[in-house]
């Protein structure tokens, strides 16, 4: 089941058809008991046309993120921070029991599918970070998945790890979508995450990796996030990046970023 949010309604997609959802409040809907069963029931409604324009699948939830959960991310973070002397910390985080978790975005700063993401004016080295994103409901259960783009200013983070919030948190520094996928079982650990960056119609970067390369389990990340925090309407958790362009690459205005997970779809954004 795939949930889409539009300006006028919420739709569920099943078997290529779209159905209106009776519950119109996103926060109430995604926290329903047995969400998958509820959405299945909605497919008894008369189908409607596919939406022409969709919004980010979010209500008033916060977005959090996990860092250094893949070996490639560890290497990239160590490379960008070697001159500051902070490289050792990323290696320690990768090996530690406790994961790196940080606040990423409020709902009103999120970029919508097909919308524009931003790069900081005071940064010279910016990249997208494609991430499988968990939706954890108010009861603490992982009930759905989306695709996240964790925009990052690598030169700011590399200068000093204490600058992480400035490197990660600003207007339109996060995008999620195109939908919230609500399966009846956890995502296949062999699911593939793909990213492509185009500039002027030319592919500047393309890569793919299986999410089974992640060092930590999804339930492990969720458990640490929920240890001393409550989320009354649920929370989105980006699970870390695994596809990092070469150090010579930086995003430019007009670049097209496409992130794809076959089970979920494709999140497309453009750099403002």
Image: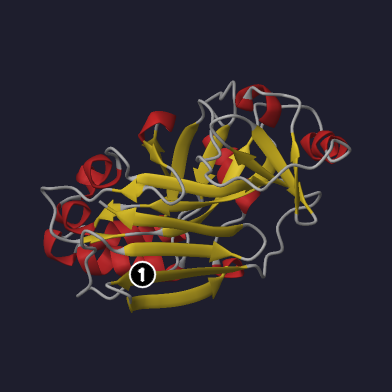
Q: Would residue 98 be visible to someone looking at this image?
A: no
Taking the image as shown, residue 183 lies to the left or right of residue 145, namely right
- Residue 23 in sight here: yes
| Residue 118 higher or lower than 83, as above or below | above
Query: In this picture, is 221 found above or below 29?
Result: below
Query: Which quarter of the picture shows residue 25?
Result: top right
Q: Tell me the element at label 1.
A: strand
Q: Residue at x 69, y 45 (%)?
A: 49
Q: Nearer the viewer, residue 2 or 192?
A: 2
Which residue is denoted by mark 1 in the rendering? 197
Left or right side of 25 for 42:
right
Which residue is drawn at the image coordinates 44% and 64% (left, top)? 258
Residue 128 spot, x, y in % from top left: 34, 59
Relative image position of residue 133 (x, y in whole percent): 54, 49
Colour mapping used in the image? secondary structure
Residue 70, image x, y percentages: 47, 65
Q: Residues within 10 Å of mark 1 (few under 14, many from 20)?
A: many
Q: Total label count?
A: 1
Residue 15 rendering spot, x and y as whole percentages? 80, 56
């Amino acid at each position: 089941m795939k949930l889409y949010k539009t300006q006028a309604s919420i739709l569920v997609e099943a078997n290529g058809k779209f159905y209106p959802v009776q519950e119109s409040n996103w926060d109430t809907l995604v926290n329903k008991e047995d969400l998958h069963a509820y959405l299945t029931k909605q497919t008894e409604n008369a189908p409607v046309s596919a939406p022409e324009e969709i919004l980010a699948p979010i209500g008033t939830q916060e977005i959090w993120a996990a860092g250094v959960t893949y070996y490639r991310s560890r290497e990239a973070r160590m490379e960008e921070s070697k001159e500051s002397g902070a490289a050792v910390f990323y290696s320690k985080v990768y090996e530690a029991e406790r994961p790196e978790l940080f606040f990423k975005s409020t709902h009103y700063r999120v970029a919508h599918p097909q919308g524009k993401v931003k790069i900081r004016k005071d940064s010279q080295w910016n990249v997208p970070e494609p991430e499988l994103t968990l939706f954890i409901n108010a009861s603490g259960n992982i009930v759905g998945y989306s695709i996240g783009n964790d925009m990052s200013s690598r030169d700011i983070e590399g200068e000093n790890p204490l600058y992480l919030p400035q490197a990660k948190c600003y207007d339109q520094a996060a995008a999620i979508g195109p939908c919230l996928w609500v399966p009846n079982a956890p995502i296949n650990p062999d699911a593939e995450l793909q990213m492509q960056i185009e500039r002027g119609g030319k592919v500047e970067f393309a890569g793919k990796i299986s999410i089974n390369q992640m060092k930590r389990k999804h339930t492990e990340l969720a458990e640490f996030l929920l240890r001393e925090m409550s989320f009354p309407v649920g929370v989105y958790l980006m699970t870390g990046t695994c596809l990092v362009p070469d150090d010579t690459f930086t995003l430019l205005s007009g670049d097209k970023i496409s992130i794809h997970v076959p089970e979920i779809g494709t999140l497309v954004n453009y750099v403002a």
